[in-house]
């Protein structure tokens, strides 16, 4: 196993339920637009985006957008509304981006939407611009939660298409957009594409490569996070049956799937990588004794939990285990398992609220804040 487990006595924490009067069925993320409004949008996998009220005791969450009548879901475990990202200039242009699945044919889509120019606070329901439509051979591993980077480009993580064993070998296929992190410019157009390809993308002009690819060899990244203070792109990649991974994404990096799972050879596939293949190992991995599906998080920069400041927080959807990682470039990651008073718990995402404080989303429909005991 990579990364050291610290043996220091760790502080203890409690997860305290917030917004308990709001029905948060299968929450995916909480997103705060970059417009100083301090609004907090709760994305639900079933297709709704709710505007959380300022008062955490209120049950009055307005529906911002409702896509639940779209034919998004055949199998509700990994399909549905899987991401929302506000344009960095949202305040000016009102644009935001949704990532969701659609059926017949099964696909995952990145769509640009915008706010009404006449009806303040409402979405222009007539405007919809399709940027990406990625065919999905299977219902699972669609990835999600695209984010804008410090460069203003949109980073879109995609899964390997699904089923087990990456059966179509898509993650290493540089013609395919599956099993990748894509980097696109939503503000321009390259050729006939509805988006621009940044000229400094690593595979621009390279034969046999889609130029949108920023990194490859991923299985089902859930989730990616740009820590703007250290200019680092974190990526949790869900494993199959060997390892759950935390990766630092580098331009043009190959993260190994499905030749490898974690730092080891992916044992179920009898396929050897090309002799010149170079893979980037995760900075941390854990095995089945600790969990079975990693949920990546955020680097915490809030004020309420001093012991976690500057730490990357992540957890496991299967076991409810929860960790804080201290990471500095070129140094081994130090990971602490957090002692948390809780019952069964399925962390699906770790988000910042409008004040930069942590909100943990439980797939069972609960939102929590964390308090140091
Ligand atoms: Ca899929
Ligand atoms: Ca990997």
Image (cartoon, helix red, strand yellow):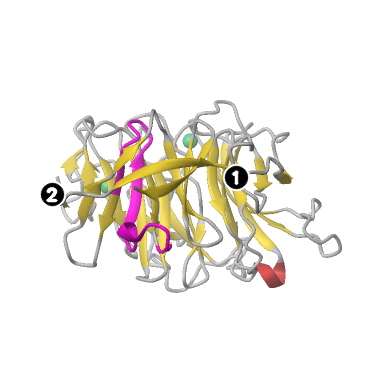
Residue 218: tell me if it is visible: no
- Closest to the camera, between mark 1 and mark 2, is 2
- Is 200 magenta? The answer is no
Q: Residues within 10 Å of mark 1 (few under 14, many from 20)?
A: many
Say above or below: 153 vs 237: below
Q: Does 172 sit left or right of 17 as displayed?
A: left
The answer to which of 213 and 370 lies nearer the viewer is: 370
Q: Does 129 sit left or right of 157 as displayed?
A: right
The residue indicated by pointer 1 is 43
Q: CA distance from mark 1 to mark 2?
A: 37 Å
**Range of magenta residues:** 301-323
Quick one: SS at disc 1?
A: strand
The reply to whether the C-beta atoms of the residues labelled 1 and 2 are less than 8 Å apart is no
Q: Pinpoint residue 74: horizontal percent, then vertical percent.
A: 59, 26
Q: Earlier in the sequence, mark 1 or mark 2?
A: 2
Residue at 60% from the left image edge and 65% from the top image edge: 186
- Is 320 magenta? The answer is yes
Residue at 62% from the left image edge and 51% from the top image edge: 41
Check the picture and name the quadrant holding the N terminus.
Answer: top left
Residue at 39% from the left image edge and 71% from the top image edge: 229
Residue at 61% from the left image edge and 54% from the top image edge: 40
Say above or below: 199 vs 48: below
Quick one: SS at disc 2?
A: loop
Q: Does 166 sit left or right of 361 as displayed?
A: left
């Amino acid at each position: 196993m990579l990364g050291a487990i610290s043996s220091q006595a760790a502080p203890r924490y409690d997860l305290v339920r917030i917004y308990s009067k709001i029905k948060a069925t299968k929450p995916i993320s909480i997103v705060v637009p970059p417009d100083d409004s301090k609004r907090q949008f709760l994305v639900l996998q079933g297709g709704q985006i709710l505007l959380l009220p300022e008062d955490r005791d209120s049950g009055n969450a307005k529906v911002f957008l409702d896509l639940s009548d779209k034919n998004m879901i055949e199998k509700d475990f990994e399909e549905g509304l899987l991401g929302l990202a506000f344009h960095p200039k949202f305040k000016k242009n009102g644009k935001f981006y949704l990532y969701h699945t659609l059926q017949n044919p099964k696909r995952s889509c990145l769509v640009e939407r915008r706010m009404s120019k006449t009806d303040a606070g409402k979405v222009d329901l007539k405007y919809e611009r399709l940027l990406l439509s990625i065919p999905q051979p299977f219902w699972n591993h669609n990835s999600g939660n695209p984010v804008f980077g410090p460069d203003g480009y949109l980073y879109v993580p995609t899964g390997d298409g699904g089923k087990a064993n990456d059966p179509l070998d898509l993650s290493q296929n540089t013609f395919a957009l599956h099993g990748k992190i894509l980097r696109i410019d939503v503000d321009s157009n390259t050729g006939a594409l509805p988006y621009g390809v940044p000229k400094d993308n690593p595979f621009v002009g390279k034969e046999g490569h889609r130029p949108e690819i920023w990194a490859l060899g991923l299985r089902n990244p859930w989730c990616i996070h740009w820590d703007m203070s250290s200019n680092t792109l974190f990526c949790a990649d869900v494993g199959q049956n060997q390892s759950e991974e935390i990766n630092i994404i580098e331009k043009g990096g190959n993260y190994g799937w499905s030749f490898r799972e974690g730092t080891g050879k992916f044992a179920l596939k009898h396929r050897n990588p090309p002799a010149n293949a170079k893979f980037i190992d995760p900075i941390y991995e854990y095995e089945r004794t600790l969990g079975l599906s990693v949920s990546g998080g955020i680097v915490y920069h809030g004020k309420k939990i001093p012991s976690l400041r500057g730490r990357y927080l992540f957890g496991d959807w299967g076991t409810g285990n929860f960790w804080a990682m201290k990471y500095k470039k070129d140094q081994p990651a130090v990971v602490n398992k957090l002692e948390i008073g809780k019952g069964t718990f399925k962390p699906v995402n770790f988000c910042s609220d409008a004040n930069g404080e942590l909100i943990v989303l439980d797939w069972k429909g609960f939102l929590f804040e964390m308090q140091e005991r």
